[in-house]
Amino acid sequence: MTQVNWSRLAPLLQRLGSVIGLVLLFIVLSVMSPDFLTTGNLLSVLRQVSINALIAFGMTFVILAGGIDLSVGAILALTGAITAGLMAAGHGLALSMGAGLGLGLVLGMVNGALVSWGKVAPFIATLGTMTLLRGLTLVYTQGTPIPVTDAGFALLGGGYLAHLLPLPVIWMFVVFAACAFLLRGTVFGRHVMAIGGNEEAARLSGVRLAPMKLAIYGLSGLLSAVAGVVLTSRLYSAQSTAGSGYELDAIAAVVLGGTSLSGGRGWLFGTLIGALLIGFLNNGLNLLDVSSFYQQVVKGVVILIAVLLDRRQ
Amino acid sequence: MTQVNWSRLAPLLQRLGSVIGLVLLFIVLSVMSPDFLTTGNLLSVLRQVSINALIAFGMTFVILAGGIDLSVGAILALTGAITAGLMAAGHGLALSMGAGLGLGLVLGMVNGALVSWGKVAPFIATLGTMTLLRGLTLVYTQGTPIPVTDAGFALLGGGYLAHLLPLPVIWMFVVFAACAFLLRGTVFGRHVMAIGGNEEAARLSGVRLAPMKLAIYGLSGLLSAVAGVVLTSRLYSAQSTAGSGYELDAIAAVVLGGTSLSGGRGWLFGTLIGALLIGFLNNGLNLLDVSSFYQQVVKGVVILIAVLLDRRQ
Amino acid sequence: SQQGPGESAPASAASGGGAASTGTPVVGLALSTQNNPFFVELKNGAEQAAKSAGVQLVVVDAQDDPARQISSVEDLIQRRVSVILLNPTDSSALAGAVQSAQRANIPVVTLDRGVDGVQVASHIASDNIAGGKMAADFLAKQLDGKGNVIELQGVPGTSAARERGKGFDDAIAGTGMKIVAEQPANFDRAQGLSVTENLLQANDNVQAIFAQNDEMALGAVQALAGKNRKVLVVGFDGTPDGKAAVENGSMAATVAQQPEEIGKLGVQTAKKLIDKQPVETNIAVPLKLLTKP
Amino acid sequence: MAAPLIRMQGIQKAFGPVKVLEGVDFELRAGEVHALMGENGAGKSTLMKILTGIYAPDGGRIDVDGEATAIASPADAEKHGIAIIHQDLNLIPSLSIADNLFLGREEHRFGLLRRRAMAERARAWLARVGMDRLDPDTSVERLSVGRQQMVEIARALGQNARVLIMDEPTAALTESETDTLFRLIRELRAQGTGIVYVSHRMEEIFALCDRISVLRDGQFVGTRDVPGLGFDEVVKMMVGRTLDARFPARTPHVGPVRLSVEHVGGGMVHDVSFDLHAGEVLGVAGLLGAGRTELARLLFGLDRLESGRVTLDGRPVTPKTPSEAIHAGFGFVTEDRKGQGLVLDLSLRENVSLPRVPARAGLVDRPAEKKQTRGLIDALKIRTRDMELDVRALSGGNQQKVVLAKWLALKPRVLILDEPTRGVDVGGKAEIYHIINQLAEQGVAILMISSELPEVLAMSDRILVMHEGRATALLDARGATQETVMTAATGGK
Ligand SMILES: Nc1ncnc2c1ncn2[C@@H]1O[C@H](COP(=O)(O)OP(=O)(O)OP(=O)(O)O)[C@@H](O)[C@H]1O
Ligand SMILES: Nc1ncnc2c1ncn2[C@@H]1O[C@H](COP(=O)(O)OP(=O)(O)OP(=O)(O)O)[C@@H](O)[C@H]1O
Ligand SMILES: [Mg+2]
Ligand SMILES: [Mg+2]
């Protein structure tokens, strides 16, 4: 911790580690696969990335504040199921979506309450809610997928802007811009960084930890619900098992983007880069016909190389 | 951190939280199911618990030192497969087991090297090796189980002492005793606690971090390999997908046992209790024939109650 | 179908045209998972058939995640494969992906599971519900229509768990047999072992165990080992390990699917599509109840 | 003459582009107490960290006993008989005192701990530094900062080193512990130990040291014999000019009662009453663990107020959280600046504006924030190249000024200062005193907890003395002397 001997430029260079990684991957894939560098493919990857990115943006706030949220995938599944379920029961699109998103916010705030008032470590608190919410999703769906019937709703995840740009990509960039501003331009964002950097010092400076944590985890829950709604729309159905393992993908995106897991240091743009890195890697492995057994090997190696390149604790 | 105003007794009482939880669960299950409190059932649960406990003991050292190891399940799968594969290829029991256990140790040390020399955050380093090792296991096994043929080897996980006590239970208690002594009675254990309490201060006091971390993660890898060998023996075959999700079970056991995820505070006995809590809970849910949809709900609730009972960050 | 007005073919995908530009045609196989020997065998069958049919096979794996599968189907579209063999993670989630492929003039053949709400070029599968019923009928015959049964369930919420369970449960309901416990062991051998151990503690009087896949059945066999009880274990899938267990008598039966056959037929159908020959829209791969000879 | 114990020549060290040490020479003889002086950020700690193997020098040589030696790790340093007490506390909070005393050099047989032997020696070591009432099994996090410092000293003494480096060992200590420490240092000197003594407390230098070396901006200024050296001369070497006055003159304008504390109790504080007037500086003196910090925590809503009542400008206030306290008009500069005062990974600007970010409707007003920060940097003469620099990279003294700046931005009605000049150099202290005076003139009521008696005597209007959680005296500063304060602080009336 003490031996910080990089200059002022170094943090920026280090931050650019993930960007450099993405550019390298881009070049390699462009050379190796003729199908990679096409508008169609790039847009398709962006759309694939959008779900993970939406979740990872919320996760960035949680991690910056020194926490972690393992329940994002479970929130995605439950909110998606509730949205689809309400629509199937004949409630309108607005009500159903509102209920799904509202539920995501509330569930996130429950995490925040466990962490702040309950004084439970974030890892274990959200591990508990993850298990609980997965169970509730199964109970609610009875284990069967809930089909989506509303054509308007299906557009949300499957539609295009100007016949070209997939709508989920739009949502991703809108949410990114909003979150980046929230983090950099508002008092809330400042306090997030302060809590992650030194919670006690932040508290003594008058930062109110409990409301902050409710808001931070609430934001993560809300964005997971957004991802849940978009995914449900994209799949034309809500799956009880949707989103399994998404928490690890989101955390990987955040960390690959250069945000420190111990909190207080990081940026949202890095998370976008991290999510793209994962998305392009998956895409490239498929395009290059890497044997599926080796795909995991390659992914593991890439994760390790990427974090070694931008080495920090 | 600063506002420590409990008496000297409080930490002990708090530690007993998990024991009290276990006793409560025990009483509830005894009342609700006539089949619960029988020698046969209790021994059978102990045997089921042994795999998770073996991994969790190693995880305790890692967490006490302020780290985390997500690769334990993947190490279990790969070492189990290698052991079974070598035996299937006609190598002797001793060589095959030695290779499996040695590999576990080495893989753990690789984690340690990434964390210490590579300065990669433990979460992300072991997430990377987890992905990588899962891939290698798939490559090695080609996705199909490797059957065990050696009857002597099968005893290791399936045999009994005095026709009553399952051997895995013996291994669990032997490893527990050894690890508890290692933690409490040796310089190594003292340094583990010191690193978790304040890594920088430990370093300045002359604790050599790199060798310590190699040893700590190496121990975790070794014990995962022990669990892998015992599980392979017990199942008469090595599965490429063995041990998925075991990292979360092991972490849950450690934390339910009262060890702090931020390091420096905890005990090994708690981990044993935590593992038993999880084992008895699973057993109880089966005995009471709780619907599969509700099982996760119950588990989530129990985790949350248990950690709220012994609330600490 | 469910296409909204704004939905139309993305620019480049339209240029797909179905055939790779040079040499051997490429067929994409989108697997649901490889964490299960069943699908590994399916893949192996497809690979063998590809070799003899002279097509190149590209395999992508969704790790049981529908969203990931959509992504990998999209990747196959971008690669402009000639045919996509789709082994869906779930029958309800892939309609959009199938439509995207079809818009790019890539025919889709579904394997093992269907996709609701779309018309595909061909569907090759064995029927999980029928398989569950076969297992129930077998047990009813062995036990003269009475007795207690334990059911080991797969991962809750997956289609295999749902359909096999439904076929089995419905058929049992029509007999004098009783399902005394239904518990999830998540298609995993180790969990099959411990859940069976636990259930045997609570149920002394059990005559049969139905496991929704062979892995769990083999776990149950381990749990029964050394116990002086006669319990019939029936699995599902007919994996090599499962078949071996039936042969040596530790399992009473397994509802064998022929995953290699599914894979093989898939590639052969794809070849026909490439050669513009007609194909059957529904190819049933028979299930076989394997019992000790 | 025998070779000196340590000779460092031409030592160079840079962190990135920042040159911290440029050709520094330093020599330590056996049996001397050698003061190392310099302003905050002059490079004292860095030089000592090089000597103890924590940093590798970029250039220069180190001779131990006249022989060129490479010291690559703390373990190397220990091998050569070099022990150090670091400026920041370096204890493991969750471990016991005994565990901490032996950390890194546990007594063992084949790796097995010899607990009983260590417990016995731990007791002896604690007794040596006058802490015989402490149980070696107590975990360190339950000790006050001062006691933790004494544990650190006990640990360093336990190494029986030939070279003992003390980097501001007394910053957290009061007079009586300081006396104990000085007695020990003199004993060691008599036994031939070479001692490097870093401190910003001038009295100590003249009372204790034989020679003095001074650094300025990473450059070696010179070495002098202490006898015959004057205060002004030392300051001139350090600062490059003479200082107007150590304690700036005060013209008190004491206004009406602002804060009224009546029979307040909670934790180890019992029945404390006093009035604090607008424009007044009330000094709080006491020994280690007298409960001064706890009193401040009670007022600031950090610990639960169990009895008594507090009124601010006539209105009762019982803040339950720091944020409520801040709204009521309190400000609190804590004694532990790294643990509680600063977010080390945020920039100076972000730290300064943390209690109240200049904002409109939740949106940060960047220009206003920069302007405010610039103003505070100038007012407090914080030495930094850039307000965007992480505070981690500032020297200790400058970090302390940042903590102060944080509260100045808020314009509190009552400002509680807990050891406000801990680790600050003479020049910086004078500046902080100046600021305290200015605040008082603006009508801010100031409660100043300090363990430096000269500071308390010179800066306060009145002095509250505490002993074991109770107020034992409320003295007028003009009539008070070190003796009267100490008498009250030790419980005598
Ligand atoms: N790890 C580091 N990375 C970058 N700069 C550093 C580091 N450590 C110290 N510095 C810088 O080196 C300079 C010297 O710091 P040092 O801590 O040696 O000063 P000091 O003389 O001990 O001051 P003080 O009296 O305040 O303790 C300061 O400008 C400080 O900002
Ligand atoms: N006998 C004791 N044993 C253990 N801890 C004690 C004892 N007496 C006091 N303390 C600790 O000392 C602290 C109270 O001292 P406090 O820090 O308020 O005093 P202080 O006068 O400000 O001293 P310091 O100069 O160390 O800050 C409490 O946190 C308490 O835990
Ligand atoms: Mg210093
Ligand atoms: Mg104090």
Image (tube, coloured by chain):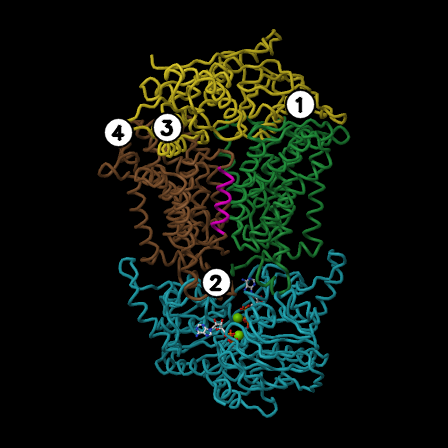
Chain colours: A green, B brown, C yellow, D cyan
Residue, disc 2: D55
- Please state which of residues D299 and C54 is positioned toward the viewer in this rendering: D299
Left/right placement of residue D45 relative to residue B237 reads right
Q: Amino acid at mark 4?
A: Ala
User: Callout 1, which amino acid?
Assistant: Ser
> At which x and y percent is residue B73?
42, 39
Please state which of the two labelled residues, at mark 3 or mark 4, is closer to the viewer. 3
Foreground disc of the pair 2, 1: 1
Q: Is residue D36 visible?
A: no
* Dots 2 and 1 on the same chain: no
Q: Which residues are magenta?
A: B295-307
The majority secondary structure of the magenta stretch comes to helix
* Residue underneath mark 3: C220
As helix, strand or loop, the secondary structure at mark 3 comes to: helix
- Disc 4 is placed on an element classified as helix
- The residue carrying pointer 1 sits among few (fewer than 14), some (14 to 19) or many (20 or more) residues within 10 Å by Cα, namely many
Can you identify the residue that label 4 sits on?
B151
In space, the residues marked 2 and 4 are separated at their CA atoms by: 58 Å
Figure quadrant of residue A96: top right
Identify the chain of the residue marked 1, using the numbered disc in the image.
Answer: C
Q: Image point 33% across, 12% down: which residue?
A: C293
> Is D454 rendered above or below residue A30?
below
Of the two numbered discs 2 and 4 in the rendering, the one whose residue sits closer to the viewer: 4
Residue under numbered circle 1: C100
Label 2 C-beta lies within 8 Å of the nearest ligand 1 atom: yes
- Label 4 crowd bin: few (<14), some (14–19), many (20+), radius 10 Å: few
- Same subunit under labels 2 and 4? no
Q: Nearer the viewer, residue A249 or B312?
A: B312
Q: Position of residue B246 (x, y in %)?
A: 43, 40
- The reply to whether callout 3 and callout 4 are in contact (CB within 8 Å) is no
Specify the amino acid type for callout 3.
Ala
Secondary structure state at the residue bearing disc 1: helix
